[in-house]
Each structure stands twice: as C-alpha cells, then as structure tokens.
Image (cartoon, rainbow, N blue to C red):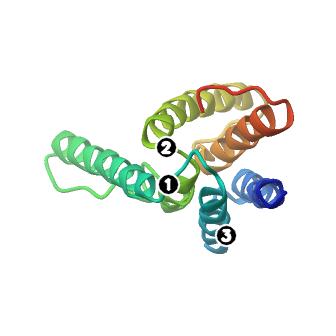
C-alpha cells in the first residue's frame, strides 16, 4: 500500500515537471529534490531495487555528461561546458533524481528509450509549435508516468 502511495505521489510531482518544462523550458529545483526523495522511498519499499544502483546510475549520467563535454570541446577546439547551452541543468538534475527508480540495466534502457521518445515527441510537437529548445525533462517525466501506469496500473511488466 505504501508503495502505491509513493508512486502516486511521484506521478503528481512528475506532472508538475511536465507542466513547468513545457511552459517555461525550466523546472524549479524543488521538483527534482522531491522526485529523488520519493524515488528513494520507492527504492526502499521495492524488493527489486537497491541503493547500490543509485551510484551506478549516477556514474552513468556523469560519464554521459563527460562524453558531451569532450565532444563539444573537440568540435569547438576549446573546453566547452554544454550545460545550459546544449543541455539544460534541469535535465541533468532530473536524470540524477530518477536514479533510485531503476536497476543499472533498466536505467540504461530507460535512458535510451526516453531520449528516443523525447525526440519523437518533440518532432510531433514542432508540427504545432516551432521551438528551438527541447523540454527534455518534461518529455522524460511523461515517459516515466506512462511506464509507471503500464507497470503498476495495467500490471504489464515492460523491460523497465
């Protein structure tokens, strides 16, 4: 019962992420903090997850950020910080905030599938409204809500 309350609370917070990111192209810092806290509770209550996965998942995010820094630095022939130019700080913090929700393998799968989902969602949204920025955290929050619904409401266990 406590697990379903935590998941429902997480879904509500994720809705706020979607709304804020789509509207303002930024999210308030309290939202990732709430997500990480609730995700930690879900991790604690879940038999499938453990706290060691948080470290592995966070290291995966940091390796990806390092890869982006190296790529842009080589491309521009100078040390470049792509945070807030190519990738928003809110997106990075969101990726860290959801780390307690997944084992390492499923986090990588969610990361890749979420980026593909975001690309498709943004491609569809540009038909209706042109935008130079992508609300990545908002799209990923929507993708996460859809995954939570499939897993916990419809009882269909996807790879996530």
Residue at the disc numbered 1 = 50
Task: Give the number of callouts.
Answer: 3
In the picture, measured across the screen, residue 111 lies left or right of residue 66, that is right
Residue 19 or residue 129, whichever sits in front: 19
Give residue 108's quadrant in the image: top left
Give residue 129's quadrant in the image: top right
Closest to the camera, between mark 1 and mark 3, is 1
Where does the C terminus fall, quadrant-wise?
Answer: top right
Q: Do the residues labelled 1 and 2 touch (CB within 8 Å)?
A: yes
* Mark before the other along the chain sequence, 1 or 3: 3
Residue 76 or residue 138, whichever sits in front: 138
74 lies above or below 99: above
Locate residue 71, reporting x and y percent: 24, 41
How far is disc 1 from disc 3 in space, using C-alphas?
19 Å
| Secondary structure found at label 2 | loop
93 lies above or below 144: below
Residue at the disc numbered 3 = 34
Closest to the camera, between mark 2 and mark 3, is 2
In the picture, measured across the screen, residue 61 lies left or right of residue 99, that is left
Locate residue 44, reporting x and y percent: 60, 61
Residue at image location 73% in from the left, 50% down from the top = 22
Residue at the disc numbered 2 = 103
């Amino acid at each position: 019962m406590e697990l379903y309350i935590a998941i429902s609370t997480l879904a509500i917070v994720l809705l706020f992420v979607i709304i804020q990111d789509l509207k303002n192209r930024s999210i308030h810092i309290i939202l990732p903090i709430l997500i990480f806290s609730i995700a930690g509770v879900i991790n604690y209550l879940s038999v499938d997850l453990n706290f060691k996965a948080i470290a592995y998942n966070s290291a995966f995010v940091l390796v990806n950020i390092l890869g982006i820094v190296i790529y842009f630095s080589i491309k521009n022939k100078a040390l470049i910080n792509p945070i807030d130019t190519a990738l928003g700080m809110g997106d990075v913090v969101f990726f860290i905030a959801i780390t307690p929700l997944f084992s390492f393998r499923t986090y990588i799968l969610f990361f890749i599938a979420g980026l593909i989902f975001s690309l498709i969602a943004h491609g569809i949204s540009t038909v209706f409204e042109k935008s130079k920025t992508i609300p990545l955290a908002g799209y990923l929050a929507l993708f996460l809500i859809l995954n939570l619904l499939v897993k916990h409401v419809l009882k269909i266990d996807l790879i996530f």
